Amino acid sequence: MRIAVLNGPNLNLLGQREPELYGRATLAEIEAMVRAAASPLQVEIEWFQTNHEGALVDAVQALRGRVDGAVINAAALTHTSLALRDALLAVRLPFVEVHLSNIFAREPERRHSLIADLAVGVVAGFGAESYRLALQALVGRLHASPA
Ligand code: CA2
């Protein structure tokens, strides 16, 4: 099984600022944690981060036929990007939306996701652990009902 983990704008800054919101782990440390969790599940991970909306749309379009599902932290694009929504609608791939922070307990503009209704589920508020929980839940779902 192959799972893509897609990360949006500014997540490359993790660990450097705002630890009270997003924790102290860097994105590289989160990647290592996800790869370690994926290995015993016999899941291969494709890891990607971009600060650019179009690059994230390109990455979503390129998922088709290559991976079984995706874990997606679209960062601020979660709340703004109809282009990302359209790309996810086009590829029709099972994905879990993930957030480090509990977006539902934050500013009003962060409480709405333009992609959540397309997701298998949403994991938010557990810091880096959100990624591992999302991976495990997605793999469980894919084993239960393969695409
Ligand atoms: O909680 C999450 O995972 C978010 O997707 C993180 C995004 C934010 O825009 C979403 O509303 C929720 C922010 C990405 C990280 O931004 C940083 C900014 C400064 C320093 C470190 C990270």
Image: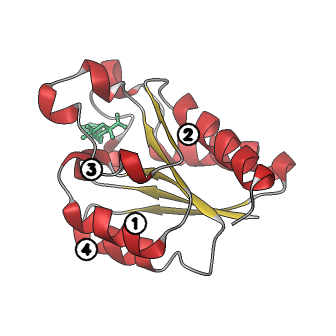
Instruction: Find disc 1 in the rendering and name its residue.
Output: 88
Viewer can see residue 129: yes
Q: Residue at x 29, y 64 (%)?
A: 84
Q: Earlier in the sequence, mark 4 or mark 3?
A: 4
Given this view, does label 2 or label 1 mark the residue nearer the observer?
A: 1
Cα gap from disc 4 to disc 1, whole angstroms: 13 Å
Q: Earlier in the sequence, mark 1 or mark 3?
A: 1
For the residue pair 51 and 41, the one nearer the viewer reads as 41
Instruction: Find disc 3 in the rendering and name its residue.
Output: 114
Instruction: Find disc 4 in the rendering and name its residue.
Output: 54
Q: Residues within 10 Å of mark 1 (few under 14, many from 20)?
A: many
On screen, residue 113 above or below 91: above
Cα gap from disc 4 to disc 2, whole angstroms: 23 Å
Given this view, does label 4 or label 1 mark the residue nearer the observer?
A: 1
- 69 relative to 101 in the view: left or right: right
- The kind of secondary structure element at disc 4 is helix
On screen, residue 50 above or below 108: below
Which three-letter amino acid code belongs to the residue tagged 1? Leu
**Cβ of disc 3 within 8 Å of ligand 1?**
no
Cα gap from disc 1 to disc 3, whole angstroms: 11 Å
Q: Earlier in the sequence, mark 4 or mark 1?
A: 4
**Cβ of disc 1 within 8 Å of ligand 1?**
no
For the residue pair 99 and 30, the one nearer the viewer reads as 99
User: Residue 19 placed where, x, y %?
Assistant: 34, 23
Q: Residues within 10 Å of mark 2 (few under 14, many from 20)?
A: many
**Cβ of disc 2 within 8 Å of ligand 1?**
no
- 123 relative to 68 in the view: left or right: left
User: Residue 82 placed where, x, y %?
Assistant: 21, 62
Viewer can see residue 59: no
- The kind of secondary structure element at disc 1 is helix
Which three-letter amino acid code belongs to the residue tagged 3? Leu
